[in-house]
Amino acid sequence: MNRSLLTCVFTALVVILTFTDAIPPPVWPSAFSINFSEIAYLSFITLYQNDGTLYYNYYDKQARFDHNRGQGDFFCMFQRLSEHDKKAPCQVLFSNDTNLYVHYPEAKTCCRVCGTDHACGVLKPDWLKNGTYLGSEMVNGTKCNGWETPGYAFMDSWYLTDANIPCLYHEKSDHIGAIHNMTFNQKSFTLGAPNPDIFNVPSYCHRQCPWDPFHPIGK
């Protein structure tokens, strides 16, 4: 390899590394809401598929994930709150009383999952601060930059536009081969605090959930 070619290769590597280093980890807006389509599968088997909405207000330490009919959410599915209709809509509510609740609005059943005992607080806007840049992908026709960081059980990836609008949340377990995706409807993105009533805890949310996802059976 001649000196000119070596110089070109070295220059190209410097440009690539400089470009990558120039993209800082994303920081979520402090308050927003957005709709999503959700799917989870194991190998080639679809486990569940549904739509939903994410409401986020870090100013007041609140968030709510609405998993609409068809859901099989990890926090919802083992709580025995809707045994007659297991795929009924389920809300996962991070309240400013520092507790995490699971709520089935149609059945009017609810329970407390955890609180400060398990650090069940709202994701901080900078939760990706130590994440690894994954490059860019096209999501529904839009170029989105991706970042990856280890989650509680899965490897979590977050893709967003240059305007900081969510594109895709992806989590994968190499251990069991499960994949979970939330593809966001970018046109539904609303910046600013959601209606505070969204985060109200129902009066019947007073009992402890029977299943604790942070202490799996046998551990």
Image: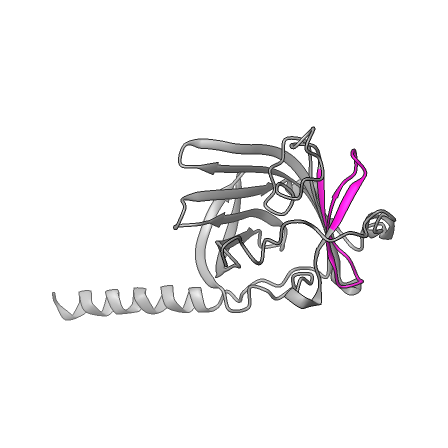
Residue farthest along the top direction in this orientation: 84
In this view, 120 is above or below 201: below
Q: Which residues are magenta?
A: 90-111
In this view, 28 is above or below 144: below
For the point 71% across and 39% down, which residue is it? 81
Does residue 66 appear anywhere in the picture? Answer: yes
Residue farthest along the front direction in this orientation: 218
Residue 98 colored in magenta in the image: yes
Near-viewer residue (174 or 166): 174
In the rendering, at what x and y percent does residue 6 appear? 19, 68
For the point 65% across and 35% down, which residue is it? 51
Does residue 55 appear anywhere in the picture? Answer: no
Near-viewer residue (117 or 181): 117
Near-viewer residue (159 or 70): 70
In the rendering, at what x and y percent does residue 163 appear? 62, 54
For the point 60% across and 37% down, which residue is it? 72
In the displayed structure image, the side of residue 67 where residue 48 appears, left or right: left
Residue 16 colored in magenta in the image: no
In the displayed structure image, the side of residue 92 where residue 198 appears, left or right: right
Residue 182 picture quarter: top right
Which quarter of the image is occupied by the N terminus? bottom left
